[in-house]
Image (cartoon, rainbow, N blue to C red):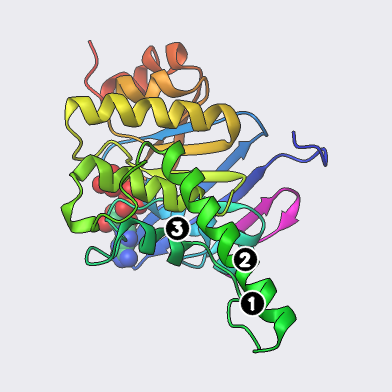
Amino acid sequence: MTKEGKPALTVRSLSKSFGGVKAIDNVSLTLDAGCSRVLIGPNGAGKTTLFNLITGEIPMDEGEIYLFGVDISQAKIQKRSELGLTRTYQISNLFKELTVEENLYLSLKDKQWNSQGDFSSLWTSWMKSYKRVQRIEEVLASVGLEGKRQTLVSSLAHGEQRQLELGMAISSNPRIIFFDEPMAGLSPNERVFMGKLIRKLAAEKIILVIEHDMDFALSLTDDVTVLDHGRVIAEGRPEEIKSNPEVKKIYKLG
Ligand SMILES: Nc1ncnc2c1ncn2[C@@H]1O[C@H](COP(=O)(O)OP(=O)(O)OP(=O)(O)O)[C@@H](O)[C@H]1O
């Protein structure tokens, strides 16, 4: 529960079809404050669709979604992010020909960015700019990219690009972060580093992670949800999930 006494996220009886395919079928899910969760399931199970529905990138057919007690079922993406929800993507959303700093700068949203020209607004604008630079430095340090401020994103290693994506996701100081396959395409060393970053974040924020690597997924949190064919087929602690007959069948576990 949050300070307000409400779960951080409540999803109730959510459904979404694409043509004849029921991608999400009557899914319910709760995320309490301080409790992160991992979402696993085979290809096409509906994991990314569930993320897209909660973040508001696609409209739901049926169901209800509450963020910190606020009904966001029909809310725009912007409203959901103002309430503290952010996400990373499977496919990179970085501007490769810009520097690390420029990418972060763009991710720090500020609607009052343009100054009106008088002294007080120039001062306000300067202060905002100063704070933004400070924030950029904090974020770079927290994702292990100190010293890379001026580097072009195209010159970063793949793992560093994923670290930057994580930095962009946390730059606005969100309360809930969704990670869509954060380990995809990383080398063994990069995986170790990313694992540490995500575990550290899980101690500070509420996180929901889609992950294909079963061992890593189950090492991340104590709460696991398994999706298959758009439905929740199992929910519980890692050891319960590993011994669940349906999960064992899907993952061909001995
Ligand atoms: N925009 C779309 N149009 C049509 N069908 C879609 C669309 N998005 C997803 N689907 C279908 O919905 C189902 C769930 O897809 P989704 O991408 O959510 O699964 P997933 O669990 O994230 O899979 P993966 O692990 O491969 O990323 C699949 O059958 C997929 O083909």
- Say which residue label 1 marks: 112
Would residue 239 be found to the left or right of residue 192 on screen?
Answer: right
- Say which residue label 2 marks: 128
Callout 2, which amino acid?
Answer: Lys
Q: Position of residue 182 (x, y in %)?
A: 33, 40
Callout 3, which amino acid?
Answer: Asn
For marks 3 and 1, give the CA distance. 28 Å
Would residue 171 be found to the left or right of residue 124 on screen?
Answer: left
Residue drawn at x 22%, y 67% is: 97
Mark carried by residue 52: 3
Q: Ligand 1 appears in which quadrant?
A: bottom left
Disc number lying in front (2 or 3):
2
Q: For the residue carrying disc 2, how many other residues have a C-alpha within 10 Å: few (<14), some (14-19), or many (20+)? A: some
Answer with mark 1 or mark 2, whichever residue precedes in sequence.
1
Q: Tell which of 220 and 139 is nearer to you.
A: 139
Q: Which residues are magenta?
A: 63-76
Answer with mark 3 or mark 1, whichever residue precedes in sequence.
3
Marks 3 & 1, CB-CB < 8 Å contact: no
Q: Position of residue 214 (x, y in %)?
A: 31, 24
Q: Is residue 66 magenta?
A: yes
